[in-house]
Image (spheres, rainbow, N blue to C red):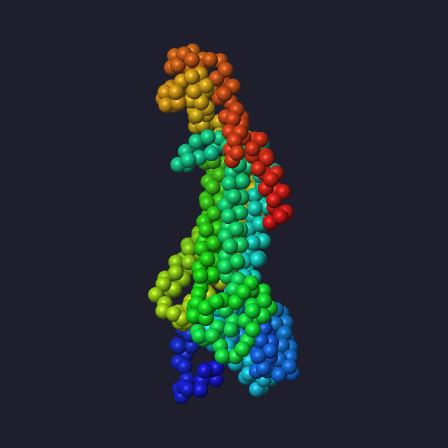
Amino acid sequence: MALWGGRFSADSSSMFRQVNDSLPFDRVMATQDMQGSIVWSRALNKAGVLTDAEQSQLESALNELIAKAEAGKLDFDASPEEDIHSFVEAALIEQLGDVGRKLHTGRSRNDQVATDFRLWVREHIDSLKQDVIGVIRSLLNTASRHQQAIIPGYTHLQRAQPIHFAHWCLAYVEMFKRDLSRLDDLRKRLNQCPLGSGALAGTTYPVDREAIAEQLGFSSPCLNSLDAVSDRDFVLELLFTASTSMMHLSRLAEDMIFYNSGEAGFLQLGDSVTSGSSLMPQKKNPDALELMRGKCGRVFGALQGLLVTMKGLPLAYNKDMQEDKEGAIDTVNQWHCCLCIASEVLDSLSLNETRCREAATQGFANATELADYLVGKGIPFRTAHDIAGKVVLVAIDQGCAIEELALDTLKSICDQIDDDVYTVLQLEYGVNQRNILGGTSAQTVTQALYQELEELDKL
Ligand code: ARG
């Protein structure tokens, strides 16, 4: 019989059960539910509801259940219960009889689920942080393996200015560091304890909410019972953080798919993270990267879905809120897998430094250098820009690079151009001129790389 069967005379329909039951997915919070129950039994004991003996029976039964849950020995599929809370309670009643029936005194599944899910999210924040740190580590290692390499930098996917490959790696490091700090922020905000808020109005039993919060590792109790049972901001923030990070992974994937293309040929991916074609024997496809990009759809969908679910809900708890779980569970799983596979892809890649250099030299990516050179000769930038543009036109016409034009030709466009221009037009020259904080010179990039490597140990 359901926990709430008393006032019902007919059974639930099987379709209702299919729509209503959450045990098929909220079983992932089994240990969190049991930990919450242990702390609740202690609170009831202090409040005079449970004797010492009853409390200790409950605590050992719950500890046994935790061990079973961790060993994967709980048979959820055979259970008639609707959710993880009733599953655990039913197991206690089966084992302890009336003592089990006392545990739910002063508690509601509403403050229970809010507590369990916070604990579940908090645990995953901690493990996801390690996954993000793993990607940062792989990016830094990849940068270290190719410290001298220069690739074309793009805007509008047109070759713009040459950059160090390590500079590109470090750009993604910045993004993933922001993801880490979002996880930290989210953890701080979610770390308040709803238990003791009852169904919506608080509880009549004199439980020590501060002690409950502390024992479950929360920094304080939630301050308003209505808000405590109906707040799902912490799930939304998790989904937003995951979405933002998946967007970062997707851009990383997109860059690498392009770098790996036959057209660019900058890098090769390891066999372990690519697949072949069933028809075309020559193919080696960047599937891992495409899936990192593709899985954004469902993660962004989970965020959007929960926002829409929450937006019209009156205070306090409504069953709509049970819809917070499947999207979040799937998101955590997908995000975890994508972070791990991103690390594997980075660890497996080999950069074709010669090809990168060739591409960085092509496409007139040193035209800005020429303009800056003319500025150095006292020409205003706007005029210098125009002259450099004319030089590019002539080079296009002659089918060569700017530095391949004869000095006479250059002089015919601007007679202030001298022999020293050829130094300025060399690849390393332009790159290393950007010797400014955040810039792409060898010196700044090396400095930034070492700093990040040092900070990695503190993350
Ligand atoms: N399974 C529900 C959820 O995940 C918790 C149960 C609350 N049920 C209730 N009838 N108030 O949100």
Residue 321 place in picture, x, y as percent: 42, 68
Residue 328 place in picture, x, y as percent: 47, 62
Residue sitting farthest toward the bottom: 9
Residue 223 place in picture, x, y as percent: 48, 67
Does residue 15 sit above or below 8 in this rendering? above
Q: Quadrant of residue 450?
A: top right
Residue at 57% x, 86% y: name it. Answer: 98
Residue at 44% x, 61% y: name it. Answer: 233
Q: Is residue 277 visible?
A: no
Does residue 200 sit above or below 430 in this rendering? below
Q: Is residue 203 visible?
A: yes
Across the whole image, how many numbered discs are drawn on residues? 0
Tell which of 119 and 328 is nearer to you.
119
Q: Quadrant of residue 311?
A: bottom left
Residue 153 place in picture, x, y as percent: 47, 34
Tell which of 269 and 42 is nearer to you.
42
Does residue 100 sit above or below 358 in this rendering? below
Residue at 61% x, 42% y: name it. Answer: 453
